[in-house]
Amino acid sequence: MSEILSAIESDSAGARDFEALPVPESYRAVVVEEGDAEMFAGLPTWEKDPRKSLKVREVATPELAPGEALVAVMASAINYNTVWTSIFEPLSTFGFLRKLGGKHDLPYHVVGSDLAGVVLRVGPGVTVWKPGDRVVAHCLDVPLERPDGHNDTMLDPQQRIWGFETNFGGLAELALVKANQLMPKPEHLTWEEAASPGLVNSTAYRQLVSVNGGNMKQGDIVLIWGASGGLGSYATQFALNGGATPVCVVSSPEKAEICRSMGAELIIDRSAEGYRFWKNEQEQDPREWKRFGAKIRELTGGEDPDIVFEHPGRETFGASVFVARKGGKIVTCASTSGYLHQYDNRYLWMNLKHIISSHFANYREAWEANRLIAKGKIHPTVSKVYSMDDTGQAAHDVHRNVHQGKVGVLCLAPSEGLGVLDHELRARNIDAINRFRTS
């Protein structure tokens, strides 16, 4: 591993140099273990602790198949799917691994759906990428053996999320990906900054910008839940960058200030307003929907949202359907507060509103989202970076929503701040790059 790191840090090693390096037989990785799958049985979600289930251990390096690449991972990041994996909700991911079978079906699951690093090896049939390429990865694993996915790979019946529904993810020293997951590393960013946008940036792009999602246009009013969080911080940037007007919903004055620093002007602090959309576990409160809608109209000069960027799920979905404009769109993914959504269908059906489902992004959408990062049009939202040994704590912070933006994890990178090649572009955007930094 030290030889690999030395080659990466030299900035001059080429494809032949990396091809000459031996591939280690094993590597350090963050895993959950199948034997722990029942460790949180009977506990409420809030009490399930990723620090108890996520472990760093030595694992065997997987064999490289046609169309695959082995990447030396300099940095990765925490996404909510890693939290789900770590608390075995809504089900254990070992069911995914058993269904996939082959080399992925192991009693441990190497997690993580983001990475920035350097290609070490490519399998037969890979022609676009070569050893030594500096890359980031998006998390769509798709074989494209059937016709369904050839217009939109997210519709492929065998589509999976890498590091969640597959093994050998990015929270590790090495990672196994399909070659069509790879994209060029934005060279004005450090390894940890470049690793952080992948999943959330691509997800937000499809959900809000793409014709497969909200198809946002200039002048749209966009209601964004969790506007300073992992997904919402990118949605806020896309709205501002694309000529729309974001209405940013946050949960603290500190998070409101982050949105203002991005350029957003219309902000609702849920904690200050005291919205309670549910009277109890079974019954919602439509009066609170109306109060929320009135606040939005107060901020927008009487307009309702054209698009609602919806990802909390159960807690907010009834309000989201209610406040969308007539003919508007509620674009939904994730459901971090619960998957069983309830809403009053009268407000949907009689006002011709649209509920649109959105899940990650296809390769083209992910590529376009990464291209905007590489051009300095959209910026990473890293707030804090942990060592790989502290991944459990990082996931715990995301689970408890005490973070802002994205939480990064160093893998092979020995420290923060490494990996920058385009210093001029970085200097022009340094304030935006560091906007979310807390330490």
Image (tube, grey):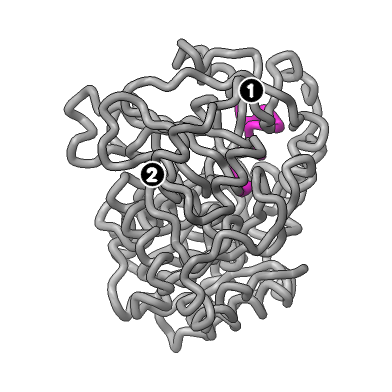
Can I make out residue 76 in this image?
Answer: no
Which residue occupies 58% across, 39% down?
A: 4
Number of the label disc, if any, that sits on residue 104: none
- From this viewpoint, which residue is outermost toward the bottom? 301
Q: Which image quadrant is residue 147 in?
A: top left
Does any portion of residue 411 appear in the rendered image? Answer: yes
Q: Residue 347: image x %, image y %?
A: 40, 58
x, y percentage for residue 424?
Answer: 47, 79
Q: Is residue 85 magenta?
A: yes
User: Which of pointers 2 and 1 indicates the residue nearer the eye?
Assistant: 1
Q: Residue placed at 62% from the left, 58% from the top?
A: 406
Name the amino acid, label 2.
Leu
Pick the quarter of the image with the N terminus. top right
The residues tagged by marks 2 and 1 sit, at their Cα atoms, a distance apart of 23 Å
Q: Quadrant of residue 405?
A: bottom right
Residue identified by numbered label 1: 26
Residue 246 in the image: state x and y as whole percent.
46, 75
Q: Secondary structure at mark 1?
A: strand
Task: Please give the residue where the numbered disc 2 appears in the rendered image.
Answer: 182
> Considering only vertical position in the picture, is 241 above or below 1?
below
Q: Which residues are magenta?
A: 75-91
Query: Mark 1, residues whose alpha carbon is within 10 Å: few (<14), some, or many (≥20)?
Result: some
**Mark 2 Cα-neighbour bin, 10 Å: few <14, some 14–19, many ≥20:** many
**The one of 427 and 239 positioned closer to us in this rendering:** 427
Front residue of this view, candidates 21 and 210? 21
Amino acid under label 1?
A: Ser
Q: Look at 43% across and 65% down and name the residue there.
A: 373
Helix, strand or loop at label 2? It is strand
25 versus 261 height, above or below: above
Q: Residue 111 in the image: state x and y as whole percent.
A: 61, 33
